[in-house]
Every structure is written in structure tokens, then in C-alpha cells.
Image (tube, coloured by chain):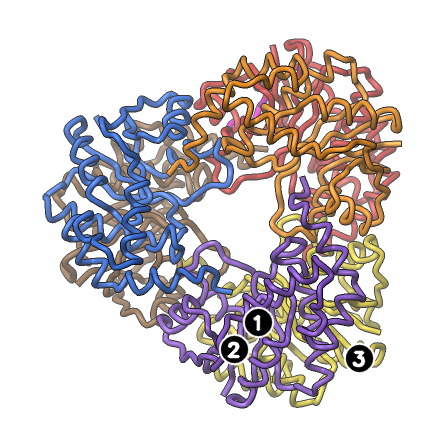
Chain colours: A purple, B blue, C brown, D orange, E red, F yellow
């Protein structure tokens, strides 16, 4: 069974890792799809998709998670087209892992099987919390895998995040 | 005389119906243009354009309003092009019915005659109110034509609206 | 049963009319979808979508074909999304009428029923032939319904077509 | 040395003029790039790019500032592409004048030299303040060059701004 | 009187210069609009818009043609919107100089005055001829102003053109 | 050293495999980027990007080529932005493998090191040849890896290709 898991991963954090490990027990291969791929250098989306893929790749490699495949998907203006858009971009899959009610509805309406994570809080909320902590130089390091921490420091993301606060380029 | 009336119709409500009936007294044919056609599965725009056309179509048919023509227009990034965009999408028309100050200005600047509705409040506000009522299972049914009520229940829009609250797909 | 029929209608000709009349015998309502709606003022696509809708509207009205609904669809870059794109733009339908092999395949793959017209030649070829005849002031008039002929002359399309030959605006 | 200065200029105000005069002391030619060129008829962006260019052109001409060149750039979805986008649109330049932290970072990362203005407050804030004053018929006139004041009144921008308050066209 | 002249300028050649000089006798200011601004590194469009602006700028400066203003416009998908698109991008103008039949028609239909050049051949044909000569290292130098020749050699365009022959990047 | 190799892979063939094997000798990891990702169901581009990724994935897996990473990139309108676009989509890399003269130029101009394959003919030509053979049921099977052959037959691509011959959907 091949699974699909979509996320923005701004940045990839411990909650994402747990979700992936949980999903991997249910399928032989997992497609991890990095969403909103065009968004970057924004307060809600500081990392480019290339950077997000690089940080996740390091986490997977370190843990020998070879059955995960990393791909990306840009946003599409019309939500009614989103599932067809995703389907054209990835190999065939059997099941979608998501707790997002809208994604759940759209995938189900298109005939896909959906499995929810047995977890309390939304993964997105954790991302928001981490970005806020990064801005305040608070203890964000313990909320992400070691490899992400190293990568974030290596590319000087904290400085970038503080510059982005000013919002518009123009 | 051929008239043009633009709206988002999220959903089509009694205020829209009254506006159309009023406009139909002034013209022999009315083009009803469903705007922001690409927007759907959003809190402010729950319905696809196909769904909006279907619900309006039922209302018109039931009332024998054969002189109305239903078309749609997607948003365009640059407001200065909006009237030319509309004009390329619809048959020729003589007059525009609108209370929206910006639409009024743009149509007038392009040389079109504009007629305002002799009504107090903005039709958009009514739409916002109805969507909020739908979310709370409040009495929204009396604010829309019977055919819209049936359609909304038929396609299970209330459930959808509640799922959309969570906002982003990714 | 509700049918869907897609065409570019550059211009609407006798072949289209015959196809619609044939389809109308099989369904209670027909959605006529004007495709490539953004294309106009080009040799292959001289008419705006508004003009195409206006000419078809006249033909339908003259013949009392009230059960036809006219809508339009712009092109989408990715063919794999085309059916989802169409579905978001029109009311629900039961069957598609088309002889185009690719459209047939895409609609079938998405689970739609497809009916082919029992006719020899492609409707598109007829359109090409008519545009060529228009350019040479050849006898194109007999190939389109009377109302289309009147409309084409009324908006001076033949002159436009000859200007378009020069191709690029810039 | 050729300089580049990017701004939205909604509208062009005294702060912009001072910034340009300061930059002109450091370079032989200055490219003034009008950003977010597609935005107009919005509360934050009332003027079309053509109007912004016309008002700046008048200011430069009146002051004999012949070494300034006016060009425009539309927004691009992906911030990571913004500098390459700018570079494809303007003649070659040696240095960028900006106080915007994000722009500074992006230009520096692409290898460009950046010079900051020795001024306290952000130019954008001044623009916001002026638009608010225009809406309230407050004393905005003293905050912009004489030519801008004349232009703003000439094209009746204050009326437009008040109409835009209603926000959406549809 | 303010004039508008649109061209692709791939590259700017003697025919363009003659056209501008002729137009400048009829107006006090001329807006030179570089069209298809997004096209570059293609056989028909080798130069970026920044490069085209830089080469024209040099020609104008050398000849003291200070009353010319250089701006650019990207293509727009829908030809019916092209004039509105141009109008939003440039300052107000009184007359358009063009020999292109389609541009003539579109500007006239929008109410603009059009003046044709009293010249035989299309300026576009000359551009095609020059690009072909460049590819064959034929005598293209005499067909462009001295400043363009210098610029073309300076940025090594001939080498680029030969590389582009292979067409697709991917 | 991390390498980048871009191709359309319509379909993935023996030439691609040889190129990848050659590149893998020079680097520790190779990013295989599937270009023109939005193109599909066209004569030149029959496969969706998801299908192309699936066929390449099978080839790599069978051969234990774990150090290859598969990603995709949609086309971008402006060639001058192409390298920045690619860079935002993939992890950091050190060298590009390509024989395409334009890609070579663009990557070099952006400061990237480029290595050419020591092979005679263009990989694209081979793709064209294979698609033509597929259409004629000629011996295309020997020109692609075994896994690609199986995949092509499994998803009935030959039938699809024959349907696409008719070109436009509308």
C-alpha cells in the first residue's frame, strides 16, 4: 500500500516526524508532498521548497527511512481542482493520511481512502508556534529533529525570519 | 434594452432575487454574471461557480424568468482591466445594475450607463450574514429562495462550510 | 438526463446546430460550453467568447430551444486537470456528447458517460474551412445558420479576420 | 555608477523625492522602478502604474532630473525569484538603494551591492499615512511634491479612494 | 500631443529609429513601449526587456532625444484586453503610431487616434531578417544604429543566438 | 559533490539511464529534475509528471540507485528566470550535467559549474524517435529500460498516444 502525506513543513518538526513514522507502519511506501511550494521568504512561509526538501531529506536519511519519497506541489487558485492537481504530480497512491477536514473532504469526494492520525492537535499550529519562537530566540530547537536544527542554523534562517517581519519587498 | 448584473452569489439570496426582479422591469433581457468564479471551498466563497449557476438556474426556471442569461467571470489581477475583461466574456449590453461604488466608477469610466438599486443595504453584507447563520445552524433558510434552500441541503453545503473553517488545505 | 457539449464555435455553424439537435433528442437539458474562451482576434479564433455566446443565443432563441444553457470555459495549461476544471464551472450533468478522441478519453477516465455523434467528419474541420472561406469572400454564408450570418456581417468580422492575418499585435 | 531604487509610490511623496535626491549624489544614473505594477483601485494601491509613472515623470521633469529612468515591475508569486525578475526587466545597474530588510537580503544574496538611506522611518509608512489623510480630506497636500498634488486633484483620486473603501468589485 | 509607439525591438534597428524620428515630428513627447517583455532567450526574441531598454536608451541619449520615454509591457493572453492592459501601464497619450493592422483596429475600437507610418514594409520583417543575418554572421551591423551594434557585441548576443537555435531548455 | 540533471523524460529511455549512470560516477548524489511538469496528454508530452516520476522510480529502485533524488519543475514563461526557478525548487547542488547549449549558458551565467556528457546525439531526439515508434507500433520496447516498457503497457500509453494525435480537446 502506497500512502500520501501533504504538509507545508515550515519548518519540518517533531510532530511531522511522528506522523510519518505512524503512517509508515501502515504502508510500504510513503509520498511526502511539500505543499505551497511557491511560498517562501514570508512570515508564515520562511523556507523555499528546495530548503524544505533538503531538511526533510536529511532527517529521512539519518533514520534510514528509504521508503519515503519527497515531492512538491504549488498552490492552485481553484480549490475544486486541488486533488486533480495533486494526482497529476505524484505516482499513484492508495491512501491519504491527513487530519485536515477540508483536505479530507476533497480527497474523499474524489474517491480516495483517508486515514486520520490519532493525535490531538493540528500539525499546522505547531509550525506557527515554532516560527514565533524562532523570532524571539526562544527554545525552538527542542521542537524539531536534530538535522533540522542544524540546517536552520546553517542557512541562517533565524536572521531571515527577522528580516521578513517587515513584510513586503516593495 | 439589455442589462448586466454582477454578483458573487455565495449563496444566491432573497436580496438578489428582488434586485433581479427590479432590474427585469427596466430591460428586456438581463445577463446575470457570477463573479469570482474561481473561488470555492473558502469561508467567504463556499460554492463552486457550477453550483452557484445551478442554484440560480432553478430559481429562474421555477419563476419562468426566461429572459435572464447566466454566465460567469473569474477574477482578474488588475482592477483597471476588469471592465474590458467582463466585456469580452458577455454579449453586448446597454446598462449595468449595481450599487457597488467601485464597480459603478469603473463601468462609468468605460462609458457604460449605470443604474442603482433603490435599496438600503449592500447585497454582499446579506451574503456574509447568511454564511454565518449557516455555520451556526441558525435560521438561514428564510433568507434564500426555496429552491436555493433545497439545493444547499441536497449538496450538503452546511457540512462543507464547517469543514472549511479550518481554512488551508495544506 | 442532462447533457454537456463542448466546442470552440469559431464560428457556430450548421454542423454544430445539427449536433445540438441530435443531442437534444437524448436529453432533457443541454449545457453548451464554449471552450478556449480567452482566445480571440486570432486567425484560428477570431471571435471573443461574448460574441460566440451572442451568436449561439440568437440561433437558439429563434428556434425556441429553451432547454439549452450557454456557458464558457477558458483553457487550462495542464490537460490532466481539464475535466475537473470543466466540472467546477458547470451544473451537474449526466452525459457528454463528443467525437473528439482525447476529450472522450479524459471524460471516460473521470467516470463520465460519453455519447458519440453518428457523423463522419470532425466539426473542427468545418470551422477551419469556414474561416478560410471568409478570408477569400467565398460562399461561407450557406455553411452557418441565418442568425450567425447576420451577426458576422453586423459586427464586421470579415474585415477583422483579414486584419488578423498579420498575426502579432506587437 | 548606475543605481536602482524600487518603490510602490502610492503616491509618490516628499520622502521619495528626498531619497532620490540623496541617491543621485552617489550615482550618475538612477533607475526608479515602480513595483507592484499590477495593483490599482485598491485601498493600499489606489493608482495605476501609468498614473504613478506620470506623476513621478512630472516631478522629475520640473526639477530637471534627466538622469533618472522610470520603469515598472509587476509582483511575482515566488519571492525567491524576485531579484532575477527585476534584473530581467531593467538595464544593468551597480548598486541598489533600499532600507527594506527583505529587499536588502535578497539583493545581497544575489551579489548586488546595497546602500541604505540615512533616514529614520520607512517610506511605506509615510504612504499609508498619506492615503489615510486623503480619505479624511486631511492635509495630505503638504506631504507630496506640488506636481503630485496637482496630478492627484486633476484625475480626481480622492473621490476614487473613497469609492474603493467598499473594497470588492464583485 | 503625446504619442505611443509599440514594438518588440528584437533588436532595435534603423527602421525603428526612422519611425521614431518621423513620429517625433508630430508630437511633443513619445512613449516607446517595449512589447512581449517577458520573452527572451528565444530565436524570435533573443534579448531580455532590460537589454532592449538599455540598447534603445543608448541610441536616444546619443541623439539627445530627451522627449522619448521608455516603458515595457508583457503579453496578455486575451487580445480583447490588450489595449486596456497597455493603457494601465503608460501615462495618458493622444495618438498611436502603428502600421500593424490588428493593433490599429484594437486601438481604434477603443477610441484612440491612430497614425500610420508612410513606409512600405513592416518593421517586424526587418527584425527577422537581422536575426537571421546575425546567425550567419552576415552583415547585420549596417542595419542597426552604431550604439546597438556596440551593445550587441558587448553582451555577446551572437553567441547566445546560436545557442538558442537548439530551442528548448528542457 | 551533488549533481543536477534536468530532462523531460517523455518517456525515460536507455539514453537517460546511461547519462545518469555516467553522472553518478562523478557525484555522491544526483538530483533528477523532471522538467515541463505541467505538460501531458500532448503528442510531444504524453505522460503526466506523476507517471514520469513513477517510471523513473521503478528503474532506479530495480538498480539500487538510492543516491538519486527525483523532483519536478513546471515551465516558467520568462527564460531569464529559469535558473532561479530551478534553484528555488531543489536542494543545493554543485554541478549541472547537460548537453543542451541554452541550459549550459543559463547555468554558467548564474555561476554554476556545468559538465557535458561525452555522447554524440541529443537525448531529446531519442525521445521524439521513441514516441513516433510508439505511434506506429514499431519496436520502441528495446529503446527503454524493461521497467519503463512494463509501465507504458500497464497504463495503456500507446492507446493514449494515438488518441492525442487529434490534438485539441476543444
Residue bearing mark 2: A4
Magenta residues, as a range? E98-102
Given residues C163 and F136, the one toward you in this image is C163
How far is mark 1 from mark 3, CA to CA?
Answer: 26 Å
| Residue at image location 81% in from the left, 43% down from the top | E157
Q: Which residue is mark 3?
A: F24
Q: Nearer the viewer, residue F130 or E10?
A: E10
Q: Say above or below: B99 vs C78.
A: above
Is residue E100 shown in magenta? yes
Q: Which dot marks residue A163?
A: none
**Whole-percent x, y for residue E26 in the image:** 64, 9
Instruction: Give the residue number, with chain letter if any, for mark 1.
Output: A33
Q: Is disc 2 in contact with disc 1, using a CB cutoff of under 8 Å?
A: yes
Q: Nearer the viewer, mark 1 or mark 3?
A: 1
The first of marks 2 and 1 along the sequence is: 2
Residue in front for this viewpoint, E167 or C107: C107
Quadrant (top left/top right/bottom left/bottom right) for the N terminus of chain E? top right
Q: Is residue E115 visible?
A: no
Instruction: Tell me if residue A170 comes above or below residue E71 in the rendering.
Output: below
Q: Which quarter of the picture shows residue C109?
A: bottom left
Quadrant of the image occupied by residue A78: bottom left
Which chain letter goes with mark 2?
A
Disc 1 chain ID: A
Amino acid at each position: 500500500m502506497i500512502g500520501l502525506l501533504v504538509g507545508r513543513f515550515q519548518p519540518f518538526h517533531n510532530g511531522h516526524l511522528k506522523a510519518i513514522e505512524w503512517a509508515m507502519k501502515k504502508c510500504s511506501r510513503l509520498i511526502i508532498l511539500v505543499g505551497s511550494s511557491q511560498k517562501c521568504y514570508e512570515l508564515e512561509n520562511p523556507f523555499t521548497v528546495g530548503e524544505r526538501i533538503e531538511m526533510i531529506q536529511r532527517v529521512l536519511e539519518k533514520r534510514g527511512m528509504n521508503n519515503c519519497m519527497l515531492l512538491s506541489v504549488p498552490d492552485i487558485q481553484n480549490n475544486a481542482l486541488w486533488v486533480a492537481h495533486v494526482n497529476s504530480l505524484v505516482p499513484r497512491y492508495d491512501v491519504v493520511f491527513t487530519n485536515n477536514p477540508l483536505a479530507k473532504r476533497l480527497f474523499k469526494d474524489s474517491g480516495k481512502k483517508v486515514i486520520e492520525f490519532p493525535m490531538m492537535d493540528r500539525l499546522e499550529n505547531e509550525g506557527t508556534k515554532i516560527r514565533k519562537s524562532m523570532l524571539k530566540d526562544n527554545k525552538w530547537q527542542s521542537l524539531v529533529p536534530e538535522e533540522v536544527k542544524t540546517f536552520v542554523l546553517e542557512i541562517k534562517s533565524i536572521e531571515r525570519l527577522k528580516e521578513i517581519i517587515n513584510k513586503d519587498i516593495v
